[in-house]
Image (cartoon, rainbow, N blue to C red):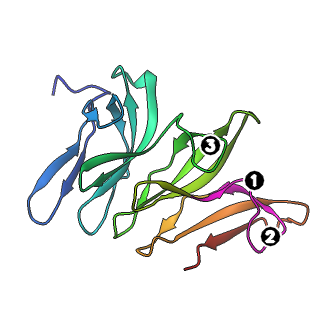
Amino acid sequence: GSAVDDLNNRGIWASRGGTGVELVVGPRDIAPGANARFSALSDGPQIDEAGRIAFKAFISIDGEFAQSDRSIWREGDAGLQLVAREGSDSPLTDATFDSFFDPRLNPSGQTAFWSLLFFAEANEYRSGIWAQLPNGGLELIAVAGESAPDTNAVFEFIGNPAFNNAGQTAFSSTLIGPEVTPENTWGIWSQSV
C-alpha cells in the first residue's frame, strides 16, 4: 500500500497449531527491553517444535535504519527476549558483538548463534559462536584465535553452527598455524556430551 516503504515492508509471521497465520513482530514495533524499535527484520527466522521463534533484526532508537544496531531475538514464555546486541559486551571475551548470522533454534527452544566480534584493544575482528543457556545467559562455544581441539592450530574463521536438541553445537572452521597446509586448512568440531 501507499504507507509501505523500505523501513516497514517486512514482518515475521508464524502459523502455530492451526490458529492461522499471526504477526510475531513487525517493522517499527517496540523492541522489548532494548529502548528501541525494530527497523529491519531477517529473512531467516527459525521456529521450534513449540512454535517459538528466533530471528536476527536491526533495532533503532530513532526508528531510522541508518542508526541501527544488529541484534538476535528469541521468543520465550514471557514474549520476545533480546539475546545479543551489537556493541554489547561478549561474555568471556574482551570484545563486543558486531554483527550476526541468523540464529539457530533447537527443538527445546535454545538458541545458538554466530557473531563477528570487535576486539578494541587489538583493533581486530574475529568470529565466534555462543549458545543461550536455560537461565538466559550466554555460553561461549568457540572464538577465532583460540586453539582448535586435537590440532596444533587455532581457529581462523568459524562458520555458522548446527544445534541439536541436547544443546550441542557443531561447526566448521578454517585453521591457521605453522603445521597448516592446503590439505588440512579446515575441519568440523562438535561438543561432546
In the image, residue 127 lies in the stretch drawn in magenta? no
Given this view, does label 3 or label 2 mark the residue nearer the observer?
3
In the image, residue 142 lies in the stretch drawn in magenta? yes
For disc 3, the marked residue is 117
Can you say which quadrant of the picture contains the N terminus?
Answer: top left
Label placed on residue 145: 1
Element at label 1: loop
Measured as percent of width and height from the top left, residue 190 is found at 60, 73
Measured as percent of width and height from the top left, residue 92 is found at 62, 51
- Choose the circle earlier in sequence order: 1 or 2: 1
- Whole-number angstrom distance, CA of label 1 to CA of label 2: 17 Å
Three-letter amino acid code of the residue under disc 1:
Gly
- Whole-number angstrom distance, CA of label 3 to CA of label 2: 25 Å
- Choose the circle earlier in sequence order: 3 or 1: 3
In which quadrant of the rendered view does residue 185 lie?
bottom right
Residue at x 37% of width, y 49% of height: 55
Measured as percent of width and height from the top left, residue 57 is found at 39, 40
Q: Which residues are magenta?
A: 140-158
- Whole-number angstrom distance, CA of label 3 to CA of label 1: 12 Å
Label placed on residue 133: none
